Image: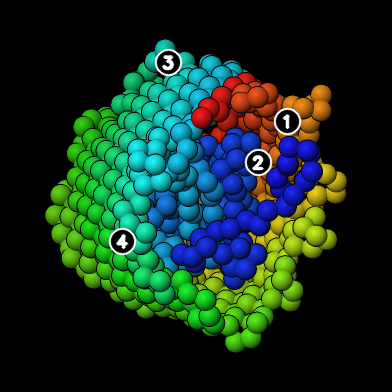
Amino acid sequence: MAQTASGEQTYEEFVVTAQKREERLLDVPMSIEAFSGEEMEERGIDTVEDLSFAVPGLTTRSDGPGSYTIFMRGVANQYGGGATVSTYMDEAPLTLTGYDQLYFPTMDLERVEVLKGPQGTLYGQGSVSGTIRYITKDPVLNVFEGSLKGALSTVDEGNTKREFTGIMNIPIVQDVAALRIAANVQDGGGWIDQPEAGIEDGNEADQTSFRIKGLWQATDLLTLEAMILRHRSETRLGQGFEQPDRTNFVAIDPSMTLVPKEYDYDLYNLEATYDFGFAELLSATTYVEHDHQYPFAYQSSGPDMRGYAGSDYEGNDARWVEADQFTQELRLTSTGFGPWKWTIGAYYSDSEKTLDALSDYVYFAFGPPVYGAPYHSEQESKQSSVFANASYDLTDRLEVGAGVRYFRDERDEFYRETGVDEEETFDSVDPRIFASYAITDSANVYASIARGFRSGGVNSGDGQVYDPESLISYELGTKASVLDGAVDFELAVFFSQYDDMLRRGLVPTPGSGSGTTQTTSNIGEAEIKGIEGGVTWRPLDGLALNATFAATDAEVTHVDRQDQAQDGDLTSLEGDPIDYVPDFSLTLGAQYDFYWADSIPGFARVDYSYRDKVPYTDRTAFFSHAVPQYSDIVRLLDARIGLTYGRATYELFGTNLTNENVYIDPYHAWENANRTRPRAVGVSAKYDFQ
């Protein structure tokens, strides 16, 4: 919804590029939630965890600032050969592994697209259950413009957060070349303490992000775009895990100071686009260097836990990750008018990751602590694929389409302590078919069937190879804009068959006499059923009311008992829920755009999100009466009000206004869980210039 200078309300169609071409959101035959960059700012969505509470059916697990594992549509699995949800910034992939999804600073955004369901045809194996796309603003070739924004907020029982964002668009050669620069600096905002070590508010992050994007219109047909993104972050208490009293857990000796979390990466991207008239050729090249140092404390104790060989166990790790990834995509997309729309392309990536750790741990039943136990692993993955997607307008209203991707993953995994060094190759053919029928120009129904795939891998303890997992999803949905754009709605139902599902378990270490080894295996099959939808209603000029929801039933339906001595050796049994999947989640929002004193535009916004508790099931770690483990129910209320006077905008905002203090994560029995962030209240000021 846009507001003219006279106060008149107009409705603008939302355009997305989910299928690698510009289309109305209404016309895309899949479930998508999209947010403009302005809405992301007005809702205060800064991280993918914030996004998860704005998008029902999307959940995350966080291992400290910047480290997220992302789950969607009932496919919530941390273990395996890759991610189940991929993330992109423009054409640059931000997914390195399932655990290494690069933190994205949400500054100077055009929009965010959350694509639900398997996206393997166009986005590859990391998109088993969906894809998140951050679309940044392009340089403008003929306008000098920018903005400066500062924000100051106080955190309940914590310290003050300071944040500054600067954006500048600089034409270099009028109508030919331009640069767009965005920078963000923030510090403070911590609230977690480690009293035994004398640390207060230790989870505050000193963070800087700098992005420069260059655009050169080399000829009428050739466009070149280059981007560099540099991100640096340091946090003294880097786990992010906390107790109900807002303190940090440290094993063995609570007065020990663990290594701080340092999260750094550099991303380089070059895109070249050539317009042939009938089609557009895109080359996208990306290189990423990532360094990550972080602590990790854990314990297996308490009456509900099986523990390691029946004993209490706890420890602290200092971990170091070094990763780099090169990717290259070539894509030819039709641009002409006519009944055919098509895309063909090829993709290649080469990624390497090393993980080093020093562990301090103690088995209380087996002697004193062990300090500095080393661990080293190396993983390399070379992926290649070819893909095609096409649709045909059978009539003015009926469109049918299909796509397919052939994928190959050559993996090499080395674990120094156990001597495991294995090379394995996994491949897959992943199809998609769909149909869409336009009931009117502003209402349609669609159906799709898509397959997703995730590679297998090698276990560190015994070198055993686990197979890939796959998912077939069936979706039926409708989208419409009615009453002259005053009401928009969409509704989708889906069913997914999840085969060879991967899970982590603990098995006895041969010959050790105590302790176990973590192992990943294909446990069997699962089924996921769900319904999701949303509606936006504009009952009067300036007022928009919206609601979105997702209801999901995700459970294990068959367990492969081969080579298992008893059910207690299995991670899951038939009927167990899939991890990190809420039965129901909901968002409610209201925004009112107004004029104060007839000349000063402003807005007021309120957002509420509700999420059912999410489960975690591991029968190798917990006694049967204690599974599943659960998080708490989460209820969050945010509000923001702003006024624009001339070129300056002033805002007052509050997050978690009811000051909820509950577990987001069900992994709290291991002391490895996050809680909701405390209430924060702040002000911001922004100045636009040109």
Please tell me whether mark 3 or mark 1 is closer to you in this view.
1
| Mark 2, residue position | 634
The disc label shown at residue 283, or none: 4
| Mark 3, residue position | 199
Q: Compared to 30, does 670 lie above or below?
A: above
Label located before the other in sequence (3 or 2): 3
Q: Compared to 669, does 27 lie above or below?
A: below
Q: Compared to 523, does 265 lie above or below?
A: above
Local crowd at mark 4 within 10 Å, few (<14), some, or many (≥20)?
Answer: some
Measured as percent of width and height from the top left, residue 1 is found at 71, 48
Q: Is residue 150 left or right of residue 312?
A: right
Secondary structure found at label 1: strand
> Answer yes or no: do the residues labelled 1 and 4 have beta carbons within 8 Å?
no
Secondary structure found at label 3: loop
In 3D space, how far apart are the residues under numbered discs 2 and 1 (Cα atoms)? 30 Å
Please tell me whether mark 2 or mark 1 is closer to you in this view.
1
Mark 2 is on which residue type?
Val
Label located before the other in sequence (3 or 4): 3
Mark 4 is on which residue type?
Ser
| Mark 1, residue position | 602
Q: Is residue 371 visible?
A: yes
Mark 3 is on which residue type?
Ile
Q: Is residue 261 left or right of residue 165?
A: left
Label located before the other in sequence (1 or 4): 4
- What residue appears at the point 48 percent right and 49 percent down from the top-left corner? 134
In 3D space, how far apart are the residues under numbered discs 1 and 4 (Cα atoms)? 42 Å
Measured as percent of width and height from the top left, residue 520 is found at 35, 60
